[in-house]
Amino acid sequence: MQTEWGKVTHLTITSHEQPPWGVKQQIKNELLGKEALAIEVFPKESELVDKADMYHLWVLHEQQLPFGIK
């Protein structure tokens, strides 16, 4: 989808168990590549939609975050 941050891909991961971080990373890598940057959002309670065991990753194609792991 096109946003004010440029192209963003929304990945949803559905699981009956909470997948570990490495599994989410592997899914992102397999679908969009090892160098794709993705973020997981924890919304404000007033915007929370929690109807399934679903995790959301947002892949930013044209932006870099002003912070990172390193």
Image (cartoon, rainbow, N blue to C red):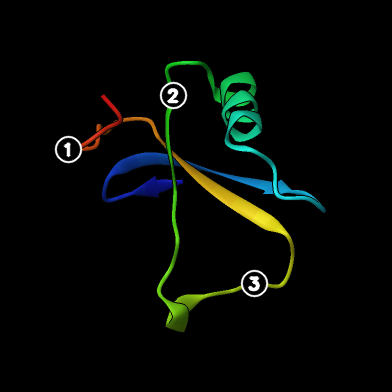
Q: Residues within 10 Å of mark 3 (few under 14, many from 20)?
A: few
Place of residue 4 in the rendered image (x, y in percent of width and height, measured from the top left): 26, 51
The residue wearing badge 2 is 36
- The residue type indicated by label 1 comes to Pro
| Residue beneath the point at 17% across and 37% down | 66
Residue 11 in which image quadrant: top right
- The residue at which mark 1 appears reads as 66
Which of disc 1 and disc 2 is earlier in sequence? 2
- Residue 44: % across, % down: 40, 74
Residue closest to the far bottom: 46
Question: Is residue 31 shown left or right of residue 48?
Answer: right
Identify which amino acid the numbered label 2 is placed on.
Answer: Ala
Give the residue displayed 78% in from the left and 50% down from the top.
17
Q: CA distance from mark 1 to mark 3?
A: 29 Å
Q: Secondary structure at mark 3?
A: loop
Q: Nearer the viewer, mark 2 or mark 3?
A: 3
* Label annotation for residue 16: none
Q: State the residue at coordinates (70%, 49%).
A: 18
Q: Secondary structure at mark 1?
A: loop
Q: Amino acid at mark 3?
A: Asp
28 versus 7 height, above or below: above
What residue would you read off at disc 3?
50
Relative to 16, residue 46 above or below: below
Residue lying furthest left in this view?
Answer: 66
* Quadrant (top left/top right/bottom left/bottom right) for the C terminus: top left
Label 2 with label 3: CB-CB less than 8 Å: no
